[in-house]
Image (cartoon, rainbow, N blue to C red):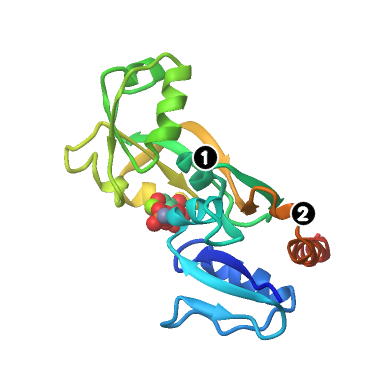
Amino acid sequence: MKTLKIAIQKSGRLNEKSVELLKNCGLNFENYKSSLISPVSNFPLEILFLRDDDIPEYVQDGIADLGIVGENVIQETEVEVSYLQKLGFGKCSLKIAVPNNNSITALEQLNGKAIATTYPVILGKYLAEKNITSDIRTISGSVEISPGLGLSDAICDLVSTGGTLKSNGLVPFADVMSSEAVLIGQKGSENDDLVQELIQRIQSVLRAKE
Ligand code: PRP
Ligand code: ZN
Ligand code: MG
């Protein structure tokens, strides 16, 4: 019999809620400790624990059949996958933020300014739509410290509680996109009986929470 693979985040904002959702679906598995793959004992499924940024491509390429990841990561990687279900957790928004002692009050003032981000694709499209040309500096993490180090004038990063911005002396300036965790599948996977069974279980867990 066929075994499905589902990729979830190995650590970070979505990990705990992703594990909780799968457990609430009645799936029995060992939570990630050192092994990056966990078999489910009572359903033909294996859980892969990955970096969230890699999940969309793994699903697109069929290395995993399914994935749980933020919409922001999917949009940034520009993959072709099927959106199967919004999951109602991991809500956050991608925002441009500026130092709290700044004099930037209008979007046009970002023209010619350096903006540090891990989301160059989404930010690039957003700025192009607004006819703004900034110097987008792509870095892979700790984006929030870059204005303080003199590396950028502004940042574009995910904001959830707002704690990271605040502790780095930044204030949100513009909303670029809002995001939450979604279940994605390889294109066409929605026609698979096992995938359907899993979607049904997830939907009944979500309904019970309403
Ligand atoms: C995001 C983002 C910020 C932090 C903001 O990281 O990059 O650093 O969360 O959260 P806060 O508003 O609650 O302080 P994420 O958890 O998505 O991890 P990753 O960027 O390493 O994938
Ligand atoms: Zn990430
Ligand atoms: Mg981050």
Left or right: 82, with 57 as reference point: right
User: Is label 2's Cβ within 8 Å of ligand 2?
Assistant: no
Instruction: Check disc 1 and give the amino acid type.
Output: Gln
Q: Is residue 173 visible?
A: no
Q: Is residue 60 visible?
A: yes
Q: Secondary structure at mark 1?
A: helix
The quarter of the displayed image where residue 170 is located:
top left
Looking at the image, tell me whether mark 2 or mark 1 is earlier in sequence order. Answer: 1
Rendered location of residue 131, percent (x, y):
42, 13
The residue depicted at 56 percent of the width and 85 percent of the height is 30
CB-based contact (under 8 Å), mark 2 and mark 1 = no
Crowding at mark 2 (Cα within 10 Å: few <14, some 14-19, many 20+): few
Determine whether 33 is above or below 114 in the image: below
Rendered location of residue 150, percent (x, y):
17, 37
Viewer-nearest residue: 154 or 72: 72
Q: Secondary structure at mark 2?
A: helix
Crowding at mark 1 (Cα within 10 Å: few <14, some 14-19, many 20+): some
Rendered location of residue 96, percent (x, y):
41, 34
Rendered location of residue 39, percent (x, y):
59, 81
Furthest toward the left, the residue is 150
The residue depicted at 38 percent of the width and 16 percent of the height is 132
Q: Which quarter shows the N terminus?
A: bottom right
The residue depicted at 70 percent of the width and 49 percent of the height is 188
Left or right: 42, with 60 as reference point: right
Question: In the rendered image, which residue does mark 1 sit on?
Answer: 75
Determine whether 60 is above or below 39 in the image: above
Question: In the rendered image, which residue does mark 2 sit on?
Answer: 191
